[in-house]
Image (tube, rainbow, N blue to C red):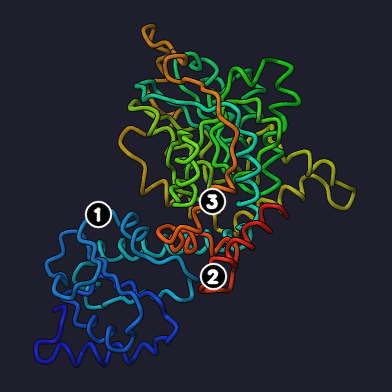
């Protein structure tokens, strides 16, 4: 039984009262609430809070009559991304209807687990936004001024190899070298040093990380690898312009990534800059997979996207940050100790588990492990030849005045509120509302800082 036979409303009131819910809660996520008798109780007590319901697939009962967003299908993450407001995790409360656990068992537990994973990832992204918001904005407008050439693309059916910087990439390097002329290679910037050490040229290098440390992955492209080949003419930079990019990228064609935000779309549309929409995922590997899915209808093969460790090794060798370990090594803190400390921090941080859960949820039938798949074990088919010139077309970009475009859009009443809601968490960590003038002042200060 999911509800009381005699007085389900009174049962719902007692249950909600027993939870001692915080008055500051902005969003309630209900896990399989059945017919939803707790919904009117919550609406009465929390008139300004949002309530959404998640039903297990093929639920026998659901809360249609209560006029709240409710999931009846399988796309849990997509539904939550659309409906859960961007706020502090402390202001979101998950409420389970425990009789449903006894009835649905494993499917209920799976629904709850996916919800928890989503909230963990949302919390990590929120903390990152609060810490790096102003830097992202500054990066965006600085990088926009460096865009001289833009890549247009058409979808292909070529197989795509996506590389990350996990230890497993080393095992895949011989296969990638053998197949590179038959596949499109999309490389996370952190993996490019290992690829180049094996004589592999990536077609696309993707960068999304806004932290200054990310530059260490990209600098070698212009310092060392350029001695072997003309990187700017052979590879493309796919980048969210909020990423940290060195000024040398101005000579490299850009495949622009738009994170789907309203303010970025306004700027790109006004400049007539073509872009590919990939929402921020928290890890460049997830963005690389999304890009591969949009560029090709063929098979996608992953290498170095381990989200796990090899002993205490966290990344492929060579890796851009290895020099930091060696340069800081002393008698009382050898390289081995530094490697162990990095391993422990990553393991305790739990981010790899969050990203691994995202991949498990989003991987499609055409996504495979590179080293496990028969296509690569058999070798390259003779009739498959990479024709990159037919996939990409490079055009010149006109000079950009991105900040002026955004400031002008903020003055437009039709756009102002949407832009404010998007930029508020980037510029103000503790404010709930700001005036247009406060937004413009903060924006100018952040960009010119």
Classify mark 2: helix, strand or loop. loop
Percent coordinates x, y for residue 268 in the rendering: 48, 40
**Residue holding disc 3:** 406
Q: Are marks 2 and 1 in contact (CB under 8 Å)?
A: no
Crowd rating for badge 1 (residues with CA inside 10 Å; few <14, some 14–19, many 20+): some
Classify mark 3: helix, strand or loop. helix
Rendering quarter of residue 51: bottom left
- Label located before the other in sequence (1 or 3): 1
In the image, 18: left or right of 316? left
Query: From this viewpoint, which residue is outermost toward the left?
Result: 5
Query: From this viewpoint, which residue is outermost toward the right?
Result: 331
Query: From this viewpoint, which residue is outermost toward the top?
Result: 382
Percent coordinates x, y for residue 176 in the rendering: 52, 21
* Discs 2/1, front: 2
Q: Are marks 1 and 3 in contact (CB under 8 Å)?
A: no
Q: Which residue is pictured at 71% across the width and 20% down the height?
A: 226
**Residue holding disc 2:** 435
Q: Which residue is pictured at 66% across the width and 49% down the height?
A: 211
Percent coordinates x, y for residue 363 in the rendering: 36, 41
**In this orientation, which residue lies closer to the viewer: 389 or 200?**
389
In the image, 335: left or right of 307? right
Residue 74 badge: 1
Percent coordinates x, y for residue 241 in the rendering: 57, 42
Q: Name above or below for residue 356 compared with residue 128.
A: above
**In this orientation, which residue lies closer to the viewer: 228 or 195?**
228
């Amino acid at each position: 039984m999911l509800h009381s036979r005699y007085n389900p409303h009174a049962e719902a009131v007692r249950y909600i009262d027993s939870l001692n819910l915080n008055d500051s809660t902005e969003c309630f996520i209900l896990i399989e609430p059945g017919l939803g008798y707790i919904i009117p109780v919550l609406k009465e007590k929390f008139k300004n809070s949002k309530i959404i319901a998640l039903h297990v697939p093929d639920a026998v009962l659901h809360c249609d009559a209560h006029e709240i967003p409710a999931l009846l299908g399988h796309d849990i993450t997509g539904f939550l991304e659309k409906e859960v407001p961007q706020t502090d995790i402390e202001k979101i409360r998950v409420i389970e209807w425990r009789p449903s656990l006894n009835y649905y068992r494993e499917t209920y537990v799976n629904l709850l687990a996916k919800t928890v994973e989503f909230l963990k990832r949302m919390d990590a992204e929120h903390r990152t936004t609060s810490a790096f918001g102003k830097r992202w904005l500054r990066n965006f407008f600085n990088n926009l001024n460096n865009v001289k050439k833009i890549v247009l693309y058409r979808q292909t059916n070529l197989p795509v190899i996506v590389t990350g910087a996990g230890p497993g990439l080393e095992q895949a390097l011989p296969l990638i070298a053998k197949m590179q002329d038959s596949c499109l290679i999309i490389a996370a910037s952190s993996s490019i040093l290992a690829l180049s050490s094996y004589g592999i040229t990536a077609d696309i290098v993707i960068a999304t990380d806004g932290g200054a440390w990310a530059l260490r992955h990209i600098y070698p492209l212009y310092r060392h690898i350029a001695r072997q080949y003309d990187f700017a003419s052979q590879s493309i930079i796919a980048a969210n312009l909020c990423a940290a990019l060195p000024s040398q990228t101005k000579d490299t064609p850009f495949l622009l990534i738009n994170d789907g935000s309203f303010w970025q779309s306004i700027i790109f549309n006004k400049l007539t800059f073509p872009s590919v929409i990939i929402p921020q995922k928290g890890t460049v590997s997830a963005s690389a997979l999304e890009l591969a899915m949009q560029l090709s209808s063929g098979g996608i093969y992953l290498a170095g996207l381990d989200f796990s460790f090899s002993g205490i090794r966290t990344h492929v060798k060579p890796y851009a940050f290895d020099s930091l370990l060696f340069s800081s090594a002393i008698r009382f803190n050898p390289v081995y100790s530094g490697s162990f400390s990095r391993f422990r921090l990553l393991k305790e941080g739990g981010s790899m588990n969050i990203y691994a859960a995202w991949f498990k949820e989003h991987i499609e039938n055409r996504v495979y492990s590179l080293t496990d798949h028969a296509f690569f074990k058999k070798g390259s088919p003779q009739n498959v030849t990479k024709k990159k010139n037919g996939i990409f077309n490079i055009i010149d970009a006109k000079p950009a005045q991105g900040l002026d475009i955004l400031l002008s859009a903020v003055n437009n009443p039709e756009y102002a509120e949407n832009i404010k809601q998007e930029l508020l968490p980037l510029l103000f960590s503790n404010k709930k509302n700001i005036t247009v003038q406060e937004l413009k002042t903060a924006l100018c200060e952040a960009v010119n800082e």
